[in-house]
Image (cartoon, helix red, strand yellow):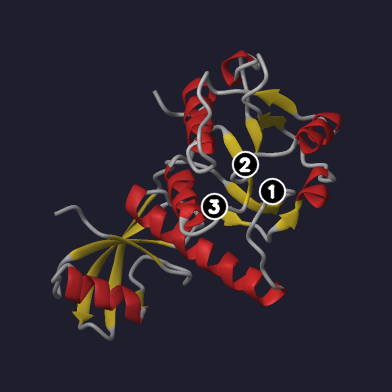
Amino acid sequence: MRTPRLYSQQRMTIDQKLALDKSACNYLASALRMTEGQEIYLFNGEGGEYKAEILSLNKNKGDALITQFVAVDRESPLQIHLAIGISRGDRMDWLVQKATELGVQQITPLFTERTEVKLSEARIEKKRGHWQKIAISACEQCQRNMIPTINKPLNLDQWLQSTEKGHKVVLHHRTEKSIAQLQNSLSKLILLVGPEGGLSDTEINVAQLRGYIAAKIGPRVLRTETAPLAAISIAQSLWGDMA
């Protein structure tokens, strides 16, 4: 069995006795049947990870002793900020999970002309927290030690007013330029993707006026949860750490 990896918000140092939270204890004790003396990895999103030995454990509480710091860095040299129209059902959950696995550093959910999801302010914060938890869980699985940030959802107009620096691309299947034709080297990609139904022509035009380059990822029209993942994979292969 692969050594389990768990996220904790706590500060960590070698020889520290750390209390595991209830959900972690339940997972280790009930799902994995782990016991005292076994090894786990812990990370807190500040870089690197820590080896730890379980000192005590049941499904409600447990303690672990941190024994070693491992200065491993699995982050891509390509910084990717994904801005995407909020989709219905569990598509957004799935997208956050997979984008995290592919190495995205930030995700900003967007309300666009064709976004069908309507959320109150309280619901927005609840959803944001939910998506952040999905990103953390994905980091535990894929062995990332840095947690991508899930930003507060914005209206597209608010997003397009951003002055964030980077190579800005809007996915558009009715253009001739492909992502692979953008340039030879890239350090930061800001990727804009629409919801179901895509961005409107007006939205794409406004994005281009704001400095976005329209690019496609092939001859087929992909779904809103597939297109950004394909684009991210291509970008990571061209300029990041995927071969």
Q: Quadrant of residue 111?
A: bottom right
Find the distance from the CA under tag 2 to the CA under tag 1: 7 Å
Q: Amino acid at mark 3?
A: Pro
Q: CA distance from mark 3 to mark 1?
A: 26 Å
Identify the secondary structure beneath mark 2: loop
Residue 95 visible, this angle: yes
Tag of residue 197: 2
Q: Residue at x 27, y 77 (%)?
A: 25
Considering depth in this image, is 174 or 124 the residue closer to the camera? 174
Q: Which quadrant of the structure image shows residue 15?
A: bottom left
Which residue lies under the disc numbered 1? Answer: 114
Q: x%, y% of residue 88?
A: 54, 57
Q: Label 3, on which residue?
A: 148
Determine the secondary structure under disc 3: loop
Residue 243 in the image: state x and y as whole percent: 39, 23
| Picture quarter with the N terminus | bottom left
